């Protein structure tokens, strides 16, 4: 059963001047799942202006967050905790994102941000519809609302691979960026990706899950979030942990499942994952894309990693005997 607590609200800034309320309800019970590797630490169901929906990418730094929507906006703010549980948002700002031409990215082709990653004084944004990678000047996770990004050159293969473009991105410990394609729903073989400018790799796929987001854990392992949609209420999400070395070796990158849940739990169209260390604990924050539909929800969900032992590629380990 879904447990939602009292309605809360905060004033947020939308664009340069207008103010509009964003509301949320707290989630205190995630629902049925295997908690052996991730412990639930609260969640929020957001409601508000259209620009606050369609979250498709997320970064966190302590309690500060930066999200990107696939309709041309940045959403930023702070998470508020009570006894370690996520209970509210603070200082929320919604800012129209500019494209490489300096204009606001309001059209689908230039607004369709699907992945975020940190850089040195920059935030990288991958725009799926245009198959372009943009780098915005930033201080920490704070992007100047007037910033005009530079376009990062991608190879012909990096632009074309993956059918519908790339869906997940993360920055490895050596500064390299990885981009991973989503793949088509129902496929259960492999998903292509790139260490940009270096090499191509594949990520193992199972049971029809498609990759929708990624981030790097302290120590270098990569966490990916995946979703499966089989029609109707056949919705599921999964979080996997993959060793960084799995992307640089031959074969398919693979790793253990940290969390798997279906629609009996508090999930929706899960598209974003961010990893950070808070008070000495590895924290994962997940977010969903509501597609601006009244049938779907915008969620923030927080978990603490309780089983941090990395298993980079269990299939290869088993094969090597």
Image (cartoon, rainbow, N blue to C red):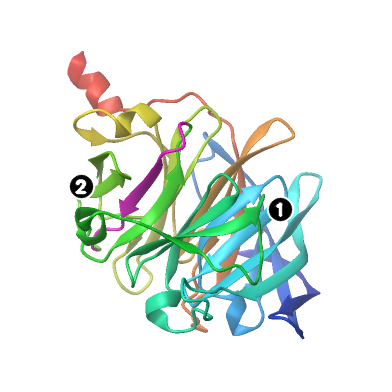
Q: Is residue 104 magenta?
A: no
Number of the label disc, if any, that sits on residue 190: 2
Would you place residue 304 above or below residue 248 in this image?
Answer: below
The residue carrying pointer 1 sits among few (fewer than 14), some (14 to 19) or many (20 or more) residues within 10 Å by Cα, namely: some
Number of the label disc, if any, that sits on residue 251: none
Would you place residue 248 above or below residue 211 in this image?
Answer: above
In the rendered structure, the answer to whether residue 8 lies left or right of residue 34 reads right
Measuring 35% from the left and 66% from the top, which residue is drawn there?
234
Q: Position of residue 172 (x, y in %)?
A: 45, 36
Would you place residue 265 above or below residue 304 in this image?
Answer: below
SS of the residue at dot 2?
strand
Q: Is residue 178 visible?
A: yes
SS of the residue at dot 1?
strand
Where residue 154 sits, quadrant-wise, is bottom left
The residue carrying pointer 2 sits among few (fewer than 14), some (14 to 19) or many (20 or more) residues within 10 Å by Cα, namely: some
Q: Is residue 182 magenta?
A: yes
In the rendered structure, the answer to whether residue 187 lies left or right of residue 275 reads left
Most distant residue in the top direction: 321
* Depth check, front residue: 16 or 258: 16
Where residue 162 sits, quadrant-wise, is bottom left
* Depth check, front residue: 310 or 73: 73
Looking at the rendered structure, the number of numbered marks drawn on it comes to 2
Q: Position of residue 317 (x, y in %)?
A: 26, 20
Q: Position of residue 92 (x, y in %)?
A: 74, 68
In the rendered structure, the answer to whether residue 94 lies left or right of residue 155 reads right
Quarter of the image that includes the N terminus: bottom right
* Depth check, front residue: 295 or 221: 221
Measuring 41% from the left and 39% from the top, which residue is drawn there?
176
Magenta segment, which residues? 174-184
- In the picture of the structure, the residue carrying the numbered disc 1 is 64
Query: Which mark sits nearer the N-terminus, 2 or 1?
Result: 1
Q: Please tell me whether mark 2 or mark 1 is closer to you in this view.
A: 1
């Amino acid at each position: 059963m879904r447990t939602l607590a009292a309605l809360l609200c905060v004033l947020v800034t939308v664009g340069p001047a207008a103010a509009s309320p964003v509301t949320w309800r707290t989630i205190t019970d995630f629902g049925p799942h295997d908690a052996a590797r991730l412990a639930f630490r609260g969640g929020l169901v957001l409601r508000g202006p259209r620009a606050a929906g369609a979250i498709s990418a997320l970064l966190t730094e302590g309690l500060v967050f930066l999200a990107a929507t696939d309709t041309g906006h940045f959403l930023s703010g702070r998470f508020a905790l009570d006894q370690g549980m996520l209970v509210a948002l603070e200082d929320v700002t919604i800012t129209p994102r500019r494209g490489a031409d300096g204009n606001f990215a309001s059209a689908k082709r230039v607004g369709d941000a699907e992945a975020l990653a940190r850089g040195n004084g920059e935030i990288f944004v991958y725009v799926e519809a245009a198959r372009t990678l943009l780098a915005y000047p930033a201080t920490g996770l704070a992007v100047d609302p007037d910033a005009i990004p530079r376009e990062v050159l991608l190879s012909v293969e990096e632009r074309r691979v993956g059918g519908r473009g790339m869906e997940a991105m993360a920055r490895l410990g050596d500064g390299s960026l990885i981009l991973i394609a989503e793949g088509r729903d129902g496929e259960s073989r492999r998903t292509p990706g790139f260490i940009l400018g270096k090499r191509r790799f594949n990520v193992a796929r199972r049971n029809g899950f498609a990759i929708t987001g990624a981030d790097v854990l302290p120590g270098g392992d990569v966490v990916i979030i995946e979703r499966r949609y089989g029609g109707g209420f056949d919705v599921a999400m999964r979080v996997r942990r993959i060793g960084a070395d799995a992307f640089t070796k031959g074969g398919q990158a693979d790793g253990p499942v940290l969390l798997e849940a279906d629609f009996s739990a508090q999930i929706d169209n899960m598209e974003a994952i961010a990893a950070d260390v808070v008070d000495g604990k590895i924290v994962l924050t997940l977010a969903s894309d509501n597609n601006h539909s009244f049938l779907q929800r915008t969620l923030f969900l927080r978990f603490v990693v309780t089983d941090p032992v990395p298993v980079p590629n269990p299939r290869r380990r088993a094969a090597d005997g």
